[in-house]
Amino acid sequence: MHPAQGLQRLDDGIEAPLRHQLSQLRLQALEAVDHIARVPYGTVTIRMKRDGFQSDRLLIDVKVSDLAALLKTYPLGDPGVEHVFDY
């Protein structure tokens, strides 16, 4: 671990940011076109139409401390959470 640089060495030798330093994540979720997003944990920052699909793509900013609760609200899949960004 390199605390001065804020990096940790993972099992495969790759250095990555220390996970405990993250305070917020961005999720990409899919939701039905006619559904009004009511996200109880986090904030919907963008809602985009998907050509040829019956769902919209949402970008949701969420605190790390609320991530588990949000994942219980939005299951994985379509509709649901498509991707979690940790940057």
Image (spheres, helix red, strand yellow):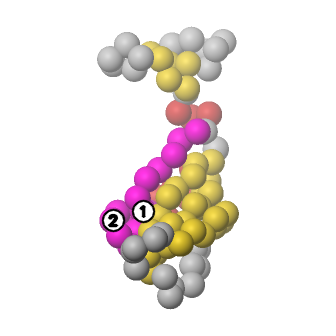
Residue at 33%, 19% (x, y): give it.
11
Instruction: Say above or below: 73 vs 26.
Output: below
Q: Given the current orientation, which residue lies at the most extreme bottom position?
A: 34
Residue at 51%, 46% (x, y): give it.
85
Q: Please give the label number shown on residue 81.
A: 1
Mark 1 to mark 2 CA distance (whole Å):
6 Å
Q: Which of 55 and 69 lies nearest the eye of the viewer?
A: 55
Classed neighbour count for the residue bearing mark 1: other residues with Cα under 10 Å, few (<14), some (14–19), many (≥20): many
Classed neighbour count for the residue bearing mark 2: other residues with Cα under 10 Å, few (<14), some (14–19), many (≥20): few
Residue at 47%, 17% (x, y): give it.
15
The answer, for residue 39, to whether it is visible in the render is yes
Asked whether, in this view, residue 9 is left or right of residue 41, the answer is left
Percent coordinates x, y for residue 22 in the rendering: 60, 39
Q: Give amino acid for label 2.
A: Gly
Q: Give amino acid for label 1.
A: Val
Q: Does residue 67 belong to the magenta stretch?
A: no
Residue at 35%, 63% (x, y): give it.
76
Q: Which residue is mark 2?
A: 77
The answer, for residue 72, to whether it is visible in the render is no
Instruction: Say above or below: 75 vs 55.
Output: above
Percent coordinates x, y for residue 73 in the rendering: 45, 72
Instruction: Say above or below: 56 vs 14.
Output: below
SS assignment at label 2: loop
Asked whether, in this view, residue 27 is left or right of residue 81, the answer is right
Q: Does residue 84 belong to the magenta stretch?
A: yes
SS assignment at label 1: strand
Task: Using the rendered view, name the quadrant where residue 3 is placed.
Answer: top right
The answer to whether the residue labelled 1 contacts the one labelled 2, judged by CB atoms less than 8 Å apart, is yes
Residue range highlighted in magenta:
71-87
Q: Given the current orientation, which residue lies at the most extreme front position?
A: 52
